[in-house]
Amino acid sequence: MGTTNRFTRAGEPEDYLAVVDQIRCIPRVRPRSRFRIKVAIITALGLTPRVAGVERTENRRVAYGTTFRRLAVVSISLVLSVVLFMGLSILAQGSNPGDALYFVKRAGEKMQLAFTWNPVEKAEKSLDFADRRLTELNQMVASKNIDPDNIAYLSEECERHQQAASSYAADVADDGKSATLNTHIKEIDRQKSSIKEKIVSTAGASGILEPAFGAAITVKDFSGNAYPGGSDSVSGRTDREGRFAFQVSAPDGLDPATLQTVIELDGRREVAPLVASDGRGSTEDGSYQIAIENPGTLVPLNQDVQYEAALASTAVMPVAGRTIHVKDLTSSSCINGVPSGATIRTDSEGKCSFTVKKNSEGKVSVITMVLDDGQKRDLGEVLRLGTVSRIGGSANAWGMTDSAFTLESNPPLESIKAGKTKVTLTLRKKYQKLTDYID
Amino acid sequence: MSKDPEVVLKGLVERAKGGDRVAYGNIFRLCYKDMYDYVYRRVGNVSDAEDISMQVFVQGLQAIGSYQERGLSVKAWLFRIAHNAVVDFLRRRKAPLEDLDQIAETKVLSRAEDGCDIEERVAFMESMGQLYKEIASLPAAQSEVLILRFIEDMNVAETASILGKKGSTVRALQFKGIRNLRLKLGEADTAAEAQRSAAGSNDHDL
């Protein structure tokens, strides 16, 4: 008598169970490596794949004319094709995946391999082609063009050439040449690991990160010259792609430095300038420059944050013992505990320090410096500081001292001219951990 | 310290429902290989299976916010999306399944038992290929149930949800499918035995 189990009813005969056991032995079909790589990249980087039409174009049969015409057409086509191919091959050498002539480049490589018979030369050619795929991958990463389909294709092609080279190298009798080939094969492995790390870090650096879906966002202008959403501020939530669109009206053109955002997501509230400061200032005549070390854009509320600055001069002016007045134009912070600003002095190397304590989060602080060397010389704006605070019971990325988000504007804010412009901000999270892109 | 996979998956689902695309991506990565196997068996073509799998990824991403675990695991939920995508695809294609031998034999060799020699692997491959051919030649409803239940390891409730049928219907289809398969395999064995006997008697005559 059969036993009751998850799959059968009580009393099933043994041959029924035997069939079930056989079915369960059928191994699963494994996706090909190129597809696995593509899925790994897309899922690890939070991308949305291009979904090709599932329907395939059916083969179409073209009717030719008489036999003679058919032969003539084929002959002329062949000759033209060879001439065209030779010309295109020369043009195609520098092409990359996605370029119109890339298929010509690949076809040329296949022909070269087909007309090589010596195993050493075959192995060397295969390694050369693997190197080319690695070069193309490096170029793609360097141009920050992280396209999953192309990366998957190039990775697989590099792997295929490398394996072909290994196979040819196994047939090489000369130990010296065999050792050289194997060294080259190992070098390719090392370069593949290096590219993998570059892809992950470049993807992080270039902003291909988790979109910040559902963030509450407010864009505000303090100049009085721009009207986001038709007034001095506009609010909303980001969509699944992390986008927030609004219209900005700027009769005299837009100064992005006067805009700030308030972003709330994952227990974190950031009031930040839309355009960060680079922490540098200089006098109008260029005689003095000042640089703030690690300027950042965010500080916690009601806490002293220390900044180190270095004064330099290209005009061989003394930088030691100079007096600098530091002030927040928006009066939303204290400098060295003083609401109206503080005076600091450079040391023998031109270095100085000061503290900023933001006591109001409503406005981004605009910290300026004025040098006094007998004359008052304006060094300009050196810091633009917002605040970060915790909201709700928990907060992701709480340890981050700088903004937890990247923000891109389309069109770029600096390019917005006078009049009305639709702006789309795309917000992404910097704190999502990217997992390894290969299973 | 490793976490219980169920707990990990539950955490990923919560994050994915909140809009975390990387969490959804991790869920998909955990499930897609089995789902791909099912899709490939139904459509019979690598490129189409890959396209449909990507389609399932996108549809799942758009719908994960409304996923509710009411006796249906997230994996089974993805399978349901995949099944519907396959049905649409086959309806549009209106063509029979492609080479069953290709489906049966592709990648089977890589999954043959370790330690088997080549002859055993080939014999295993051939027998699995033949078995799958017989399954695929059953009525569609029966072969779908057998594939989901015994190759993809879905339980009755999950299989019923994926196929949009009742649990009792799934049980009935499962029973009929195995019965028919048993008959087909029996016929195949008989035919093979007759061939061997004929070959044996020819040798004897020589």
Image (cartoon, rainbow, N blue to C red):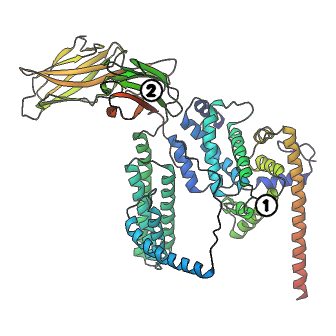
Quarter holding residue B21: top right
| Residue A129 in the image, given as x and y percentages of width and height | 43, 66
Residue type beneath disc 2? Phe
Residue type beneath disc 1? Lys
Q: Is residue A402 visible?
A: no
At a point 7% along the width and 34% down the height, the residue shown is A315
| Residue A45 in the image, given as x and y percentages of width and height | 50, 42
B164 vs B27, left or right, is: right
Vertically, is B70 above or below A154?
above
At mark 1, the secondary structure is helix
Q: Which residue is mark 2?
A: A246
Q: Which residue is mark 1?
A: B133
Q: Nearer the viewer, residue A101 or A38?
A: A101
Q: Residue furthest bottom?
A: B206
At a point 43% along the width and 26% down the height, the residue shown is A247
Mark 2 chain: A
At a point 51% along the width and 34% down the height, the residue shown is A241
User: Mark 2 against mark 1, which lies toward the viewer?
Assistant: 2
At mark 2, the secondary structure is strand
Q: Residue furthest top?
A: A339
Q: Nearer the viewer, residue A72 or A358?
A: A72
**Do the residues indicated by labels 2 and 1 lie within the same chain of the protein?**
no
Quarter holding residue A112: bottom left
Q: Quick one: label 1, few (<14), some, or many (20+) residues within 10 Å?
A: some
Q: Is residue A303 visible?
A: yes
| Residue B140 in the image, given as x and y percentages of width and height | 81, 51
Q: CA distance from mark 2 to mark 1?
A: 58 Å
